[in-house]
Image (cartoon, helix red, strand yellow):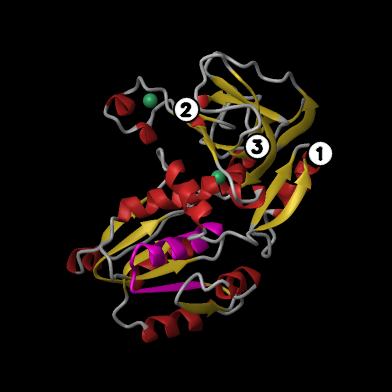
Amino acid sequence: MNAVRYNAPSQFEITEIPIPPVGPNSVLVKVRLCGLCASDKHLHEGSFFLPYPYTPGHEVVGVVEAVGEEVIDIAVGDRCVVDPIIPCERCFFCRRNTPLYCERFSGLGFGPAINGGFAQYVSVDSKNVYKFSGISDEEAVLIEPLSNAIHGLDRINAPVGIEALVLGSGPSGLMFAQLLKVSGASKVVLAANKGRKLDLAKEHGMADEYVEVDRENPVADWEAMKERYNYGFDVVIEATGSAQVANDAIHYVRRGGTLLLFSVYSHTAVVSWPPAKIFGDEIKIMGSMCQNRCFSRSVAYLESGKIAVKGMVTDKFDLKNYGAAMDKMNSRDAMKIVLKPL
Ligand SMILES: [Zn+2]
Ligand SMILES: [Zn+2]
């Protein structure tokens, strides 16, 4: 089969590798789409250490091609997505039932142990396979990112009736805005740079109010927002990945409120927050990375239509154009870029 193969940071080839074997509990999935996300960009640049060679790709949508003899409830022809997380189940954190903090954290597309979805097939344990129906592949490719946002909301554990601010209009920002609305927020404000992504949010009424930030001259818009919402917000979700926005986000949090950091930030980025404000205003600061068994709820949300992701896939590339797909990630207009291996 054809697959993307990395041999060193930024050095990849599209090459022929064997179709992975199907063990007694495994499912062979023919990949129909695989999404690219910020962590793929970081992998590409080599900012997470992984042994080479490996095939990335962790946002897999496909069709079941074969199943091992012990697999139950999944059959050839089922449409499915794959939960990419594979904790070791043996380390200090796994033994404490916190597999997300696994010391030997592995997963689909994260290292040589298991080939990711930038390939024609993946073979995965059946416990990581989730069936879906009634939605397009382009919608289903958002199930993995939505699972991560659901985990973020679990982390916040906010009561109903809150006022929330979401920073950023990438897929995660738009999904957070909608999740907050269906979870009982009384007001959701979405603040992001002007452009196509924010327009999509407005078109579908994903938030209640919008703050459009001018890319060239953002300071005035942020100041105006602070004035307009002078009590701040119970919950502020940082989903831009910008260290500068994360730095300023603390100033939009209401007394007693919560700031959630939800992006893959550069390892060298730092913030400078006034401890007197965090102390005096009793601000809670938390992070949210990945997810743990949130796929079922994510599938249910998309199948029910309560969370809209139509229009989020903006660019589709063949496997052989993987390099162009990577380059497109720097584009302002691209939301979710996907690879189509077949
Ligand atoms: Zn991802
Ligand atoms: Zn572990």
Query: Few, some or many C-alpha atoms within 10 Å of disc 1 (few <14, some 14-19, many ≥20)?
Result: some
Q: Quadrant of the image for the N terminus?
A: top right
Q: Are marks 2 and 3 in contact (CB under 8 Å)?
A: no
- Relative height, residue 131 to residue 308 (above, below): above
Q: Position of residue 254 (x, y in %)?
A: 27, 72
The residue that label 3 is drawn on is: 62
260 over 105 or under it: above or below? below
Q: Which residues are magenta?
A: 171-191
**Dot 3 or dot 1, earlier in sequence:** 3
Which quadrant of the frame does ligand 1 lie within?
A: top right
Work out whether residue 326 or residue 120 is closer to the camera in this orientation and state it: 120
Rendering quarter of residue 62? top right
State the separation of the CA atoms marked 2 and 1. 30 Å
User: Of tags 3 and 1, which is closer to the observer?
Assistant: 3
Q: Position of residue 64 (x, y in %)?
A: 64, 30
Q: Is residue 97 above or below residue 70?
A: below
**Residue at the spot of label 1:** 320
Query: What's the mark number on residue 94?
Result: none
Q: Amino acid at mark 2?
A: Lys
Q: Callout 2: few (<14), some (14-19), or many (20+) C-alpha neighbours within 10 Å?
A: some
The image position of residue 63, as x and y in percent, is 66, 34
Comparing marks 2 and 1, which lies closer to the viewer? 2
- How packed mark 3 is, by other alpha carbons closer than 10 Å (few <14, some 14-19, many 20 or more), is many
Q: CA distance from mark 2 to mark 3?
A: 15 Å
User: Which residue type does callout 3 highlight?
Assistant: Gly
Q: Which mark is residue 127?
A: 2
Q: In the displayed orientation, state which residue is furthest to the right.
A: 320
